[in-house]
């Protein structure tokens, strides 16, 4: 009977040790798996943060560029408005000058028109150099 108890006790101890070894191996594998998963999750979290920072930088750059272009557009519109006003004033001044010149000195007025016509012809010739031809007189 004592031998039975000894065998039973020894079997129990061997079984306990075998179970302990299996459990330790299983826990070790689970710990490795958990560490790998935690590392993967950490890398994904870092990538997400990096992408969020890059998105914020791109958004800020976009806003800066939009503000810059909006300012340039406003400046160019203001400049166009000023140029339009100046053109209108210049045309009015030219019309008044021409009227005075025509009324006072018709010969000078005719010479002025011919001069303007000659300048326009020269400008056209300079604008298209491959079509320059000597004028026929």
Image: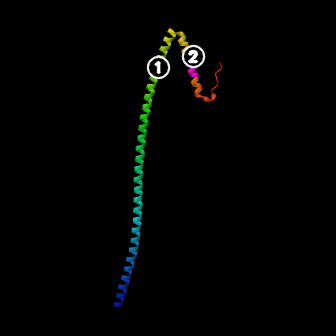
The residue identified by callout 2 is: 114
Region of the chain picked out in magenta, as a range: 114-121
- Measured in 3D between alpha carbons, the distance from the residue under mark 1 to the one under mark 2, in whole angstroms, is 20 Å
Q: Position of residue 87 (x, y in %)?
A: 47, 22
Total residue callouts: 2
The residue identified by callout 1 is: 90
Query: SS at mark 1?
Result: helix
In this rendering, position of residue 132 left or right of residue 99: right
Please say whether residue 88 is visible from this viewpoint. yes
How was the colour assigned to the protein in this rendering?
Answer: rainbow
Q: In which quarter of the image is residue 14?
A: bottom left
* Residue at x-position 41% and y-position 53%: 50
Task: Mark 1 vs mark 2: give the one in front.
Answer: 2
Q: Quadrant of residue 28?
A: bottom left
Quadrant of image for the N terminus: bottom left
Q: Where is residue 117 in the image (x, y as percent from the top left)?
A: 57, 19
- Residue 60's place in the image compared with 85, above or below, is below
- Residue 98's place in the image compared with 77, above or below, is above
Q: Position of residue 119 (x, y in %)?
A: 56, 21
């Amino acid at each position: 009977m004592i031998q039975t108890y000894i065998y039973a006790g020894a079997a129990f101890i061997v079984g306990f040790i075998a179970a302990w070894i299996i459990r330790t191996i299983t826990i070790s594998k689970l710990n490795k798996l958990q560490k790998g998963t935690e590392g993967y999750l950490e890398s994904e979290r870092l990538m997400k943060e990096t992408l969020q920072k890059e998105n914020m930088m791109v958004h800020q750059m976009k806003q800066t560029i939009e503000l810059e272009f909006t300012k340039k557009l406003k400046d160019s519109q203001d400049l166009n408005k000023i140029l339009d006003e100046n053109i209108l004033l210049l045309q009015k001044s030219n019309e008044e000058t021409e009227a005075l010149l025509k009324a006072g000195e018709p010969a000078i007025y005719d010479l002025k028109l011919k001069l303007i016509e000659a300048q326009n012809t020269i400008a056209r010739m300079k604008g298209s150099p491959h079509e320059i031809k000597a004028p026929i007189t």
